[in-house]
Each structure stands twice: as C-alpha cells, then as structure tokens.
Amino acid sequence: MTVPQQIAEVDPFHAMAIGRLAYDLAAEGRDVIHMEYGQPSTGAPAAAIAAAHAVLDSDPGGYWESTALLERIARHYEEAYGVAVDREQVILTCGASPAFVLALSSLFVPGARVALARPGYVAYRNTLKTLYLEPVEMPCGPAERYQVTAAALDALDPVPDGLILASPANPTGTVIAPGELAAIAEVCRRKNIRVVSDEIYHGLTYGDAAQSTLQHLPEAVIVNSFSKYYSMAGWRLGWLVVPPHLVAPARARMNNLFLTPSVLAQHAGLIAFDATEELEGHLHTYARNRERLLAALPRLGLSEIAPPDGAFYIYADIGHLTNDSLAFCRQLLNDTGVATAPGIDFDPVDGHRYFRMSFAVSTPLIEQAIERMADWFAARR
Ligand SMILES: Cc1ncc(COP(=O)(O)O)c(C=O)c1O
C-alpha cells in the first residue's frame, strides 16, 4: 500500500461561496434568484412529508435501516432497467456524497488512479484526493458532449485502476448514449477498470431515459440519492448498489463511519419512491425551463453549450467575456441578483471561462433571470 506523505489538499467548493453571498444579499433585502446550487427549489413530495410527520409522533427515532426501503430500491432496478438486484446489495447512505466515500474506499488503495471526465462534479476530484487517490482527468469538450468516450478511455496510458461515470452529468446534463456506454463497459471489462457510476440524475431526462451502467457491467458500483429527482436534498438520503463481494466492506464502512441514515428520511424516502405524479410535475417544469433558457441563450450571446439531455443545468462558455469565472459569477450576482456557479468548480483547467446555470427553479423565476441577464450580457458585448 502506498503511504501518503502529506495531508491531502482539497479545493474549495466555490459555488458554496456564491451561495453564501447570495443569501447575504437576500438578507439585505435584494431580490435573489438561486441558480447556483444543484438542487430542486421544491420540497419533498407531500405524501413523504405527511409520512415524516406521522413518524415524528410515533417513532422513537433510533439507529435503524429500513428493510422496506432496501426492498423498494432493489425492485426499482428490475422495474426501471430490467436488472436483478438483491436487497443485500443495496446499502443506504446519508446521500450520494458519503456513498462515494464508501464506494471509493472499498474499491481502491491509496495511490490508485481513477479516471473521470473534466468538466465533472467538483466533489469527485476532491473526494478522490481526500482518500489519497489520484484523479486522472480526461478533457472532454463539446465534440464529445463533455463525456468520457470508450476510445479516449482505451487510449489512456497507463491504464487507470478506476473510472467514475456520470450520466446525466453535472455540470453539463449530457447523457452517454447506450452504445457508447456498452463500449465503455467493454473497455473496463477488458482492462479490469473498476467503475463507480453516479446515477443521481436518473429520472431527470428530456428524451430517452438514461441507462444504468449495471445493464452493461454487473460488477459496477452504482451511486444514487434522493437529492435530485425526489427533491429531498436536505433529507440526506442515498444508496449504493454493490456487487456481492463488496457488500461486506461497503456495509462495514457505512456503519463505522456514518451508522445509519436518518429514520425520518428513510420513512419519507420510501413514500417518495411512489410520488410519481408530483415528481413528474417537477420534471415538466424543468423541461419548460430548459426550453426557455435554450431559446434565450443566443440573446445572451452564449453559443458554446451542449444542450442538456438531463439533470437541470446549462454549462456555457463565457470565454469571450472573462477569464475569471468566479469573479464573473460574483459580478453577475451583485449586478442582477442572479446566482450561478463558476466553471472552476468543475474544471480546474478550462473552467475559468465557463459558468453553470441551474434551472431547478420555477418557470417565472427562470423568465425573470433571463430578462435580468439579457441586459447585463448585452452591456458586455
Ligand atoms: C453529480 C452529483 N453527484 C453527487 C452529488 C451529491 O449529492 P447528495 O446530495 O446525494 O450527497 C451531487 C450534488 O449536487 C451531484 O451533482
């Protein structure tokens, strides 16, 4: 085992700083539109909240793992993807974030090299670094729709030990096409690359549903959560699906590091699984918001984007306006009250000339944000 020689250096999550500034401005009475965080502005489904109220009144609320929820999640894989998952393979977590810690620490020893797309979700890089794993960032541009390809993975020399996939991805919302996902799985099988697949944006797609990596690679570790489709980010509930040989190590890590997820969240999560009508309503709002933003981008002078297939983000090139995306987002927020996330969170190399807008807010707010940004962008051209 490689012994780390120094404490891991972890980068800040800059969108959080923008979020703090946005809340400070709101406290001063400014009218702020929150498009910086990747979270639904809606709450948990009404039926889930009702279930939580009933639990508060009747349950002592100790450490607990819901068998019913484990079974429901296992059944979801059969129903949504046609894949058989035993409930033993499901591990409940306090969101996708700790699920990554369990997955990566169960799969890799310090020093292992794990490939991932750049741009990508900020915490992938930083969770890897925290665990003394080496991120191998694969530059992915508009030509690859910001996603890892089988050819690029196959060409990596040396061969990485692992790969993180995200489809739909954050910050771009792009999906890996089924054929490409199958080809990536083939490379991983042939080269013994272990895969962690972040499927947190499943359910939020604007064309075909995204495939699970499990459909192509039964030994993949799947990360998912109630934070996005289920609109329950603050409830801190997620799960892992692991192959049988990883059940014991992953479960031992969960129980030692985090014990169990909250009782309230587990009860509510079980009900949320079947709050389909309400949750599909959110998806319709996001679809409408996506259309509004895509139609407005030319007016903002933003042409370098990959239209998102899923999630609720647009990642746009602002290189003609700035080479400091953090300063750009601060200025945009100060001048217009529209909070967005700087590209440097997602891409330490080229992110200085990108920003990300989250459209998981109401359509009237998206329309207001477009109006405010249109004048501001026009003044800069
Ligand atoms: C791609 C991706 N994975 C994981 C997470 C973390 O989610 P959770 O709230 O379940 O910890 C996020 C949050 O924004 C995300 O965008």
Image (cartoon, grey):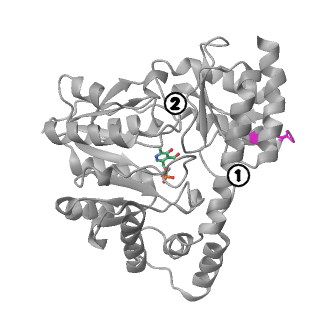
Residue 251 picture quarter: bottom left
Q: Residue at x 14, y 38 (%)?
A: 190
Name the spot of residue 79 as percent of width and height, x first.
Answer: 41, 67
Per the image, the residue denoted by label 2 is 345
Q: Quadrant of the C terminus?
A: top right
Q: Residue at x 45, y 49 (%)?
A: 210
Question: Taking 273 as reference, is 114 left or right?
Answer: left
Question: Is any part of residue 58 visible from this angle?
Answer: yes
Badges 1 and 2: C-beta atoms under 8 Å apart? no
Amino acid beneath label 1: Thr
Name the spot of residue 299 as percent of width and height, x first.
Answer: 77, 22
Q: Considering depth in this image, is 358 or 152 the residue closer to the camera?
A: 152
Q: Is residue 127 above or below residue 257?
A: above
Question: Taking 84 as reference, is 55 left or right?
Answer: right
Q: CA distance from mark 1 to mark 2?
A: 26 Å
Q: Is residue 14 above or below residue 210?
A: above
Residue that sits furthest to the bottom in the current view? 58
Span of residues in magenta = 28-33
Element under label 1?
Answer: helix
Element under label 2?
Answer: helix
Amino acid beneath label 2: Asp
